[in-house]
Amino acid sequence: MNPVIRREFIGILRSPRAFGMLACLTLVFSIAVLAKWPSDASVDLSGLQSLQVFRVFGYGLMTGVVFLVPAFPATSLVNEKNSGTLALLLNSPMNGVAIYLGKISGVLLFSVLVLLCSLPASAACYAMGGIGGDKFFFLYLVLGLLALQYSTLGMLISSYVQTSDSAVRLTYAAVFGLLFLSLLPDAFFRGTGVGGDFAAGFGDWMRNLSPLPAVMEIMGQGSVGSFGLKTLPGFTRFILLAALSSAGLSVWTISRLNHRIFDQSRSQGVITDDRSTISRILRRLVYIVDPQRRKGGIPWYLNPVMVKEYRCRRFGRAQWLLRLVSVCAVTSMVLTYMAATGITSWGVETIGALLVLLQVLLVIVLAPSLGSGLISGERDSGGWELLRMTPISSFRIVFGKLMSVVWTLLLVLMATLPGYVMMVLIAPELTLQVQQVLVCLLWTSVYALAISAAVGSLFKSTAVSTSITYVVVISIFLLPLLVWLGRDAPFGFQTVQTALLTTPVGAALSVIDAPGFEPYELLPASWWIAGVLSSVMFLVLGVQVWRLTRAV
């Protein structure tokens, strides 16, 4: 037996978070089945009741695979590299193929455990009648290939990065891209005549990189969901693309498993202030923000902790923020331009829904990435002891760290404002709705930041805090939308409205009259709930920081 398989699999099983994840999944699936289990001896011969339970169970299982599986392969190789054991493995009699198969097999065995946790619920659905065994087979086949695809993706990213927390962030960003952004090309080109048959065919194949169309087709909900999820093709395309992409990612990672993986040669560069006068003048004309220019001292009126976060964090540097802001601004303008010029048949409401979802995805990706390591990153690197020895109060420490994330999120949200301005110019009667949507998105950012900072402060390891924060934030924002996806079957109107009240995203989509969200009245209750929960999370963060500053 490959010794790496045993070491990797047992290492995952010994992790408390792995046990907690499996226990939570088993509990959730059991509750989902018991909630719809017949209370008397009668049986629904139509199979509608069992189909409702099967849909909740299927979407929940897909969510569990998407959330839980990528975290472990994302840190597999980078942890070995940082601890020095990867060099020992490469010097052992095992070749790169054996090392990779051992590591990926350990992760996949954990994925099998995730799927096995759902077997009692699936058996109960099958026992209720009305669902053929082929649906269960294809569902587990799709989710198994999904776990393989995300595991190989996480392993490839882990072979490139230098820290485990960066691996987790990049892996979840890539997973979100495959899950949601791959649907956009088909949404743009289908039925519009833009780009011809080639563009439409390309968008059709791209959308099958996402498991959503395949799972929805298995669930018999091909017409349910947002634009771009209708008229679903066969899920055999996803099976083919997942298998091919997994094979390609595996070959790519195996080619890197040699001693060249440790090579980090790069140019030392030259500081702008050390260049000639003509070169300095030219760079000032060319660059809005010169990344190679020396930074000045910290002014007295700025929080030193906030400045430290910006200068020490790669993503906090101005040139990266400007690039992100420009991409968001261009994307929002393109969406509204397509609606204004009639390139697509979408209404203003659909464009507004896409803008809202774009901003929410950015917040979900950025907030845990930036907020989870505010405290755990300092504790993990030993910088927290240095902060404790400074005369800076715990309040200024927390405020400075939070503001470093707040300004970043505000820049991202402001970058999409041109799209909303164009919406108001197209339809002036939407001015009040746009204002309410912006308030909802502001609460979304505050809510996500509060959860990320509070959850991340509870852990010492940056990688653990980042992965757990992603799971918590994604669950809070995505699970209400999964409940909405099952509206009328199996969830009733009141249940869906209560679930949507827990997230400002549902309120934003309801205000903009996104398709399927029109009948729900969520304001101002959603704002109050977000405000109360955010205050609780900030209180948890403050108490944790106060406790850590006084720890001996």
Image (cartoon, grey):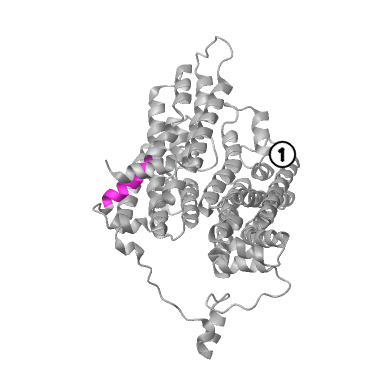
Q: Is residue 259 magenta?
A: no
> Of all residues shown, which one is farthest toward the left?
93
Q: Quadrant of the C terminus?
A: bottom right
Q: Nearer the viewer, residue 499 or 202?
A: 499
Is 532 placed above or below 83 here?
Answer: above
Q: Position of residue 215 (x, y in %)?
A: 45, 35
Q: Helix, strand, or loop for circle 1?
A: loop
Give the magenta range: 97-108
Q: Position of residue 399 (x, y in %)?
A: 70, 60
Q: Is residue 523 left or right of residue 368?
A: right
Residue 129 appears in view? no
Q: Nearer the viewer, residue 24 or 133?
A: 24
Q: Is residue 210 left or right of residue 243?
A: right
Name the residue rendered at 50%, 23% in the picture: 51
Q: How many marks?
A: 1
Mark 1 Cα shell of 10 Å, populated few (<14), some (14-19), many (≥20): many
> Of all residues shown, which one is farthest toward the top?
41
Is 331 placed above or below 45 here?
Answer: below
Residue 67 appears in view? yes
Which is the main secondary structure of the residues drawn in magenta? Answer: helix
Is 166 placed above or below 207 here?
Answer: below
Check disc 1 and give the amino acid type: Leu
Q: Position of residue 211 (x, y in %)?
A: 44, 40
Q: Nearer the viewer, residue 501 or 153?
A: 153
> Of all residues shown, which one is farthest toward the front?
552
Q: Quadrant of the N terminus?
A: top left
Q: Nearer the viewer, residue 425 or 544?
A: 544
Residue that numbered label 1 is attached to: 522
Q: Is residue 100 magenta?
A: yes
Q: Position of residue 278 (x, y in %)?
A: 52, 89
Q: Quadrant of residue 369?
A: bottom right
